[in-house]
Amino acid sequence: MTEIKKIDITPAKGRLGILTVGMGAVSTTLFAGVEATRHNIAKPIGSVTQMATIRLGKRTENRNPLIKDFVPMAQLEDIRFGAWDVFHDDCYKAACVADVLSKEHLDALRPYLEPIKPMAAVFNPRYVKLLKGDISNVKEHKTLMEKAEALIVDMEEFAKREECERLVVVWCASTEAYIEEKPVHETLEAFEKGLRENDPEIPPSMVYAYAAIRHGVPFANGAPGLNCEIGALQELADKNGVPISGKDFKTGQTLMKTIIAPGLKARMLGLKGWFSTNILGNRDGEVLDDPESFKTKEVSKLGVLDYILQPDVYPDLYKGYYHKVRINYYPPRGDSKEGWDAIDIVGWMGYPMQIKIDFLCRDSILAAPVALDLALCSDLASRAGWKGIQEWMSFFYKSPLFKKGLYPEHDLFIQQTKLKNTLRYMMGEDMITHLGNEYYDQ
Ligand SMILES: NC(=O)c1ccc[n+]([C@@H]2O[C@H](COP(=O)([O-])OP(=O)(O)OC[C@H]3O[C@@H](n4cnc5c(N)ncnc54)[C@H](O)[C@@H]3O)[C@@H](O)[C@H]2O)c1
């Protein structure tokens, strides 16, 4: 048997700055939740890094530490938050606008949220059409390259001001209009030329990703856009030894899909159709009302089932199933979205059955712990010396990034095994195969 060696990981000494692009519903709920945990107002429910345990060794060894005690993860006490946004509202005001948290929580957390003021954003209305309000907290530099360099200065100043040893950047800003990879995105050389020449095919998200990666800061993409998923930025991440990951926080309906679909497939039950529709009334929903932004989201949501069900491998069960995803902007519901799934499945001898799901979820309550876990895992990967796409973080994403030539892993349970085995591997522990023969052979 090959000996498993522990990876050399730089300890999580000093403060970690988590910078989010966008300070809307997800970011403010993330910041508030971490402050609430620090001040014993709430528990970090939904966060795998904070609440999950990991089994080590044989079942009989009873070694089940919390993940945060097993790997050298940054402590919540050591986190400092910052953000960029196009609006001037401080974090408390932004959290009030987002309307996710109760007045009781907002009042209690106000002293910690109010001091967080957004840094000026890189913005282009062409990519987010339906954002309304006083969009004036924006950088006015002439070229996209100058804007990227200004973002780097922001990061340096933030780290100095908040005395942070390390930073991570998480994209939590609005979903941008759909674009596909063009020649300007393919190589670093072409991309940097495009930044200098203000190429209209470069959206703000790529400018932030470029700035973070160029500055050696891990970058995680919580939205469905192309963002760091382009040749140029992957080249830069490899060159600079920076971990990147994406895309689109796995929450709501897609979370349910990746829980249920692997179960149906595991039992070899067929699928005729899966109709998903939902209503939400937050700012994210308003932005997604623009067909170009919705297209970005739709592509991210639709891929999931095909990868899990593998219709080419199981044509009798899954060939030609119908899959539709609808998002409807409905202001009265705010962040408390309602998602319905009508699932038509097929059983023994071809008999049809139906499953109905009515998920009354809170989008940002599901997304905030994911954003926290991504920030902490990105920082961990960076200290472990890992670079480029971090596939082991697929667990947290709707549409995981993968190396060209591979395919993404969407099955939540495979993703969970991969996540935990990666942590075991990092720390030089045996992988767990769940074979279990040894208990019976003795
Ligand atoms: N809420 C969820 O459960 C969830 C799940 C998966 C993905 N997402 C994605 O996460 C992102 C954030 O969601 P949200 O609910 O917080 O949205 P939100 O609208 O409440 O917040 C987004 C913020 O980003 C800001 N913004 C837009 N463009 C910007 C730019 N170029 N630079 C800086 N700031 C910018 C907006 O002003 C806004 O304050 C969206 O793209 C959404 O699709 C959210």
Image (tube, grey):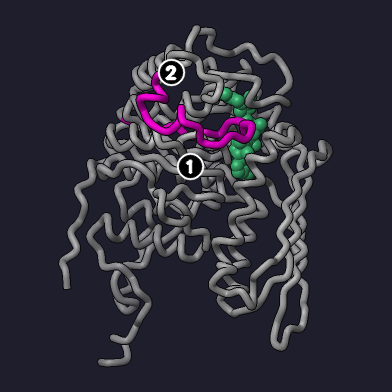
Between label 1 and label 2, give the one nearer the viewer: 2
Q: Is residue 41 left or right of residue 277?
A: left
Report the span colored magenta: 166-194
Q: Can the viewer see residue 117?
A: no
Residue at the image point whose x is 56% and y is 45% from the top: 249
Callout 2 environment at 10 Å: few (<14), some (14 to 19), or many (20+)? many
Label 2: state its secondary structure. Answer: helix
Q: Is residue 299 left or right of residue 189?
A: right
Q: Amino acid at mark 1?
A: Leu
Picture coordinates of residue 352 (x, y %)? 77, 79
- Tell me what residue is drawn at x 19 percent, y 48 percent: 8
| Residue at 34 percent of width and 46 percent of height | 73
Place residue 232 in its image quadrant: top left
N-term-proximal mark, 1 vs 2? 2
Residues at marks 1 and 2 touching, judged by CB atoms closer than 8 Å: no
Report the side of 221 relative to 339 (left or right). left
Mark number displayed over residue 148: 2
Q: Element at badge 1?
A: helix
Q: Where does residue 428 sit, x and y in percent of width and height? A: 22, 60
Residue occupied by mark 1: 372
Q: Position of residue 55 (x, y in %)?
A: 36, 67
Q: Is mark 2 within 8 Å of ligand 1?
A: no
Q: Position of residue 66 (x, y in %)?
A: 38, 58
Q: Amino acid at mark 2?
A: Ala
Mark 1 neighbour class, 10 Å CA radius: few under 14, some 14 to 19, many 20 or more: many
Seen in the picture, residue 161 relative to 80 is either above or below; the reply is above
Q: Where, quadrant-wise, is the N terminus in this rendering? A: bottom left
For the C terminus, the quadrant is bottom left
Q: Residue furthest bottom?
A: 441
